[in-house]
Image (spheres, rainbow, N blue to C red):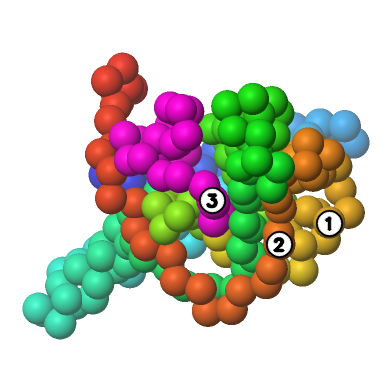
Amino acid sequence: MRVNEANIFLLIATIIIGILIAMNVNLGGKTKFLDVEQYQKAYDSRTKLQNEISNLEDQYVEINDKINKYERSSISEDEVRKEMIGEINKNKLALGLLPVVGNGVKITLNDAPEAAILGQDVPLYMLIHDSDLTMVVNDLRAAGAEAIAINGYRIIGSTAGLCAGATVEIDGIKIIAPFYITAIGNQDVIKSFLENQQNHLKSLKVRSCYVDIESVYDEKLPAYNGELKSEYLRLK
């Protein structure tokens, strides 16, 4: 359909250019002259039409190439299938649905060392809560982390946390301290952000919680294995 539209537009454009040219030649024995302003407008219109025709010709070639590609033999069908699989894998990678490997940082968080001594009398600020994990994850994303896991559980945009006594639930999975947060991304940028910029880790240190940051190399993170839910979303 786009090819037919291009042909129609070429025909119309050609007719218009012909009219513009005819405006400045002898018509039925009468000669019509354009003033400078009219001539400039006509010239600009012709140039614009010529550019549009050129763009349509390029689109025509591109569309024909695609059509020829899809109409080739089974070898071409395999190529199309590979492209489709590649696009699917890119989307899965962005969603966190594929295992990944790369360099990054590993953060170890734990309750304040004094918490075990104080027992039930320990102040809440000396403990690591689900909100602390959420803010650290947000800091890592702000620093450019491309993949994050907590205690070996992959974190994605819809991951939910809930503090339940001495444990923290992540999408229904209970984990206990110490918490190991691994992030893959630009190692230097992430470490610089965590060590030099204002972030939640510094607040945890002020609260006497245990915080350790180390570099990791070729770290493997699993794919997200939870359920993706969309109760209220629908295609527009």
Residue 179's disc number:
3
Residue 213's disc number:
2
Nearer mark to the viewer, of 2 and 1: 2
Q: Report, in whole angstroms, how far the alpha carbon at label 3 lies from the one at label 2.
A: 12 Å
Q: Earlier in the sequence, mark 3 or mark 2?
A: 3
Kind of residue indicated by mark 3 = Phe
Tell me: 153 left or right of 203. Answer: left
Task: Report if residue 22 is visible in the image.
Answer: no
Q: Secondary structure at mark 1?
A: helix
Kind of residue indicated by mark 1 = Glu
Tell me: 111 left or right of 88. Answer: right
- In the displayed structure, would residue 15 be above or below residue 119? below
**Circles 2, 1 touching at the beta carbon (< 8 Å):** yes
Between 54 and 220, which is closer to the camera in this rendering? 220
**Circles 3, 2 touching at the beta carbon (< 8 Å):** no
Task: From the top left corner, tell me how far across and down residue 58 is, in percent.
Answer: 48, 61
Between 163 and 184, which is closer to the camera in this rendering? 163
Q: Report, in whole angstroms, how far the alpha carbon at label 2 lies from the one at label 1.
A: 9 Å
Give, as a single range, the part of the protein colored magenta.
156-181
The residue where tag 1 is placed is: 195
Task: From the top left corner, tell me how far across and down residue 186 is, in percent.
Answer: 68, 66
Q: Earlier in the sequence, mark 2 or mark 1?
A: 1
- In the displayed structure, would residue 190 be above or below residue 32? below
Tell me: 110 left or right of 101. Answer: right
Position of the N terminus, as image quadrant, is top left
Task: From the top left corner, tell me how far across and down residue 231 is, in percent.
Answer: 27, 20
Q: Residue at x 30, y 58 (%)?
A: 88
Q: Few, some or many C-alpha atoms within 10 Å of disc 1 (few <14, some 14-19, many ≥20)?
A: few
Q: Residue at x 54, y 56 (%)?
A: 180
Q: Few, some or many C-alpha atoms within 10 Å of disc 3 (few <14, some 14-19, many ≥20)?
A: some
